[in-house]
Image: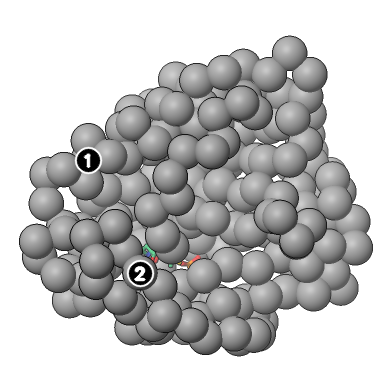
Amino acid sequence: MHIRSGTKDDAEQIAELHTRSWLTAYAEIMPPSYLNESLLKERNVMWSTRLATVASEPDHTRCLLVAVDGDALLGFAYLAVGADERILLDNLHVQPERKQSGIGRQLVYHSFGWAAERHPGKTVYLEVLRDNTAAITFYRRLDGRSTKEFMERFPTGFELPVVEYAWDPDAVRILAGNLSTTDRNWDTVVARIGSAAEKAVRPGP
Ligand SMILES: CC(C)(COP(=O)(O)OP(=O)(O)OC[C@H]1O[C@@H](n2cnc3c(N)ncnc32)[C@H](O)[C@@H]1OP(=O)(O)O)[C@@H](O)C(=O)NCCC(=O)NCCS
């Protein structure tokens, strides 16, 4: 397994993994009427839109990382600079059958490496469904601090409690410190993803 920057050629596999991950991890959390085939369609549109444009200038405002084994996608992480200038870890997913084998941890180290290098001094945060106890255990293992709780409304109208977890700049730097210098080639990460299409709908954690 190794981690590299994502490209628009990864869009389809990412949409598939994103969908499978939701169907598995949220089966007991979200209404079955929401977890149906239209999710894959929605994810395909979301990822092809997000990755469609190749930036002419390196885009340092977002970062897509993929964990791969040959041609197989094992996991991915996507980050973007938020409106409040903190860094949002917007998506983090590992193939259901490869969970708890260290892939998520490596994706977080690389994500924080990008944040620490491109946006030093910034907090990284994410939003996780309160009932996603497995992910919350994972974030706590990585020293995330719960900073906020709120209700999120989903497109079909249901609401679920969401918790924000955050890492202050020192914590980001410390976790990023787990990377070797050869893992720190962020130019290739940011140069390959576009910037114009970012306003696509965010479907939630
Ligand atoms: C959450 C997720 C990204 C974690 O990735 P992962 O590859 O499974 O986690 P890792 O193997 O790197 O685990 C890192 C640490 O967290 C712990 N951990 C991870 N999942 C755990 C679980 N379900 N229960 C208990 N501990 C867990 C591991 O034991 C490990 O601890 P250690 O290294 O101190 O022994 C992954 O499980 C996933 O994709 N889940 C479904 C989608 C999801 O919920 N994404 C987050 C949305 S906010």
Q: Quadrant of residue 197?
A: top right
- The residue singled out by tag 1 in the image is 40
Residue 124: tell me if it is visible. yes
Residue shown at the point (79%, 41%) measured from the top left: 184
Q: Nearer the viewer, residue 196 or 63?
A: 196
> Quarter of the image containing the C terminus?
bottom left
Cβ of mark 2 under 8 A from ligand 1? no
Q: Is residue 62 above or below residue 168?
A: above
- Residue kind at label 2, given as amino acid type: Arg
- The residue singled out by tag 2 in the image is 153
Q: Is residue 115 above or below residue 69?
A: below
Q: How far across and down, in percent of the image, does residue 68 sit?
A: 46, 37
Residue shown at the point (9%, 61%) measured from the top left: 33
Q: How far across and down, in percent of the image, does residue 34 sit?
A: 16, 59
Mark 2 packing: few (<14 Cα in 10 Å), some, or many (20+)?
A: few
- Residue kind at label 1, given as amino acid type: Leu
Q: Nearer the viewer, mark 2 or mark 1?
A: 2
Q: How far across and down, in percent of the image, does residue 189 sit?
A: 68, 32
Q: CA distance from mark 2 to mark 1?
A: 20 Å
